[in-house]
Every structure is written in structure tokens, then in C-alpha cells.
Amino acid sequence: MDTSRRPETPQAGPRPGPAPQTVEAGSPDPAQPAVGLRLQAEQVTAPLCYHGEGPVWDQAAGAVRWVDMLHGDLLSWTLPTGWDGEPAAEGAVERHHLGDVLACVRPRAGGGLVMALERCFALLEDGELGRTPPRRLPDVWDDPTVRFNEGACDPRGRFYAGSMAYDQREGAASLYRLDEDHSVSVVLTDLTISNGLGWEPGGAFAYYHDTPTQVLWRLVVDDDGEVVERTAVRETPDERGGPDGLAVDEEGCVWAALFGGSAVQRISPDGELLAVVEVGVGQVTACAFGGPELADLFITTSGEDLDEDEEPLAGALFHVRPGVRGLAVPPFAG
């Protein structure tokens, strides 16, 4: 693959962080591991997205939000009072166009939203959604062949978002951190498809996917927000799908979406496969806990590069109640 092009950092742009220590991965698991619990996700919206991604529960709004990433749209569904898993009513999902690409969105501590667009971060104040365009911060890089992808906030309110090349070339991606003062730093480099990210309940470390590695990584992050150690937790065989977005539950287990694998897997902190949620779409992209009790797992899917008749439900939002609660989403502090 062509690895000659890298994100070019503007003079006043990101500050490079230290290189993390990498701990060697263990042996891959069998292609068909024994699983104690199998669940079935249920469809809750029509196939509204070309490439659905990045679900997040916005507690203040009482809404689950997700993105149609490559169309640059934010979708929001305010759960009805007493909602018990029923499909969303027709017209209940709001849609707002925020940019050419909308990679991920998170709530802000003071209200409003922070987001990663194609090559920059952007902000909306409380009450501005649907009324004014996002306030764009300076571009993080100027290479048009690279875009932002997934992201999440850490317990201190710093917003991390990773990138990927449109052609998915190896080593072209990085993981960036947006601090409260809106400065940007690079925390990991030489990635390929920076994807799911989420912190364990105590906030001591994060779980992370760089999809082509097929590995769930544990990232130790210091007080300054720098990654200082990277340890392999679990390796997924290629035939099971590519590790994509993820969520962490209150017991510290990871729920990992498998792109091309029609499933979400629950993985223990020591890498054991505990449960599988079967989804009726192949391209499962991400998942997030939500609902008033954080007892619902919302799952996004993609219809990218698929014929409409091939998988008619691709692009729909799915849902399952897995019997464990998730963690409250840390808002962006800035």
C-alpha cells in the first residue's frame, strides 16, 4: 500500500505526544469460540443512513444521537416516555446536516455539542442545533485524502478522535486529542483505521480499535492525556469481521461491533468472549448504551457500497437489552 502521504500538521496545529510502549499480542482465539450467551438485536428505525456510525446517549436531551457519517448528517431520536423497545414512530428521528463529513459527536458539559468533521473539530452551543452552522476550529491537517473517523471523551472531558485515509492506506491515520482550551495534540500515529474508543469504569485506561490490526487494545493514558502503554487484550480472526466501534459497561466489559460480522461481541477485561449480539445486517459499525437507566444498547449499521436489495435493513438503528447497564458518557469540558 502507498504509505507516502501523512497528515501534514499546520505550524500552529497539533503537538506530538510521546510514543507509547507496545505490549505484544497473545495468540488469536479460534474462529468459532464457545459463547455462553447469544442475544438478538431488534430493528428500531427504518434504514435511514448510508453509513450509520457513532451512537451516543445525550442525557440532557433524553435522546440517542448518531451520524450518517459520509453524508455529514446528525440523527437524533428523543425516546418517548415509558419507551420499552418499540420501533421509532415515523418522522420521530430528526436529521440535521452539519458538514460534508460528520465523523462523531459528543455532548458538551455546558450544553451543546462537540464534533469531528472531515478535517477539523467544531462546536455548537446549547440551542444552536438546527439554527446555525457549527463553529469550525482550525483544520488539524491539510491532506484531503484523510478524514476523521470515530472518537470519545475521557473522564476529564477531553475529546479524542482518530482519522483514516479514504483509501484505507496503512499508517496514514492518527489519534488526536482536543483539550478544554481547544488546543489539539497527537497522541498516537502510524494507525490505519482509528476506530472505537471507551474508558473503563475507573477511568484508569481506555479500550481502543485500530481496525486492520484485528486487536482490542488497552491504552494506559497519563494525567496529561498521553498514551503511555498499549496492550493487546483480544485478537479477532479476520473471518469474524473487523473490530469497529465499541462501548464499555458498568462491569468493565467491552461491547465491540464487528464490521462485516453481523454482530456485537461482549469481551471481558481479560479478553474472554462472554456474549454475542446477532444483528440482521452485515456491516455493524458501533454501539452505545443509552436510555434513562443506561440499560439499552443501541447499534448502528451501514449500507455503504451495498445494493438496496442486498441487505434491505442496512443503515437502520438496532437495539438490545443485554442485562447489564452502561456508563454515563463523559461530556466535553470545553
Image: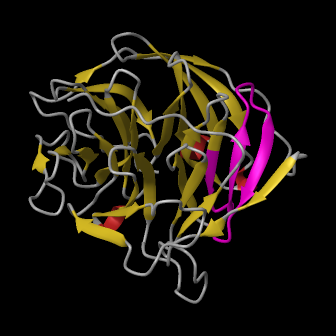
Q: Does residue 124 appear left or right of residue 237 in this picture?
A: left
Part of the protein shown in magenta: 256-282
Q: Judge by depth and name the residue closer to the eye, 82 or 29.
A: 82
Q: Is residue 207 magenta?
A: no
Residue at x 53%, y 79% (from the top left corner): 306
**Numbered marks: total:** 0
Task: Pinpoint residue 315: horizontal percent, then vertical percent.
Answer: 50, 72
> Is residue 35 rendered to the left or right of residue 198?
right
- Please provide percent x and percent y for residue 186: 30, 27
In the picture provided, is 282 more to the left or to the right than 334?
right
60 vs 197, nearest the viewer: 60
Residue furthest front as drawn: 82
Tell me which residue sits at (24%, 45%) in the image. 113
Magenta-span inclusion, residue 263: yes
Quadrant showing the C terminus = top left
- Relative to 41, does residue 206 appear above or below in the rendering? above
Task: Tell me where residue 261 appears, x and y as whole percent.
Answer: 68, 60
Residue drawn 39% across the image and 61% down it: 78
Indicate whether 275 appears above or below 100. Answer: above
**Relative to 314, residue 204 above or below:** above
| Residue 85 figure quarter | bottom right
Instruction: Say which quarter of the image contains residue 22.
Output: top right
Residue reaching furthest bottom?
A: 309
Looking at this view, is 117 or 277 the one in front? 277
Residue 4: percent from left, percent from top: 34, 43
Name the residue rendered at 67%, 21% in the picture.
Answer: 24
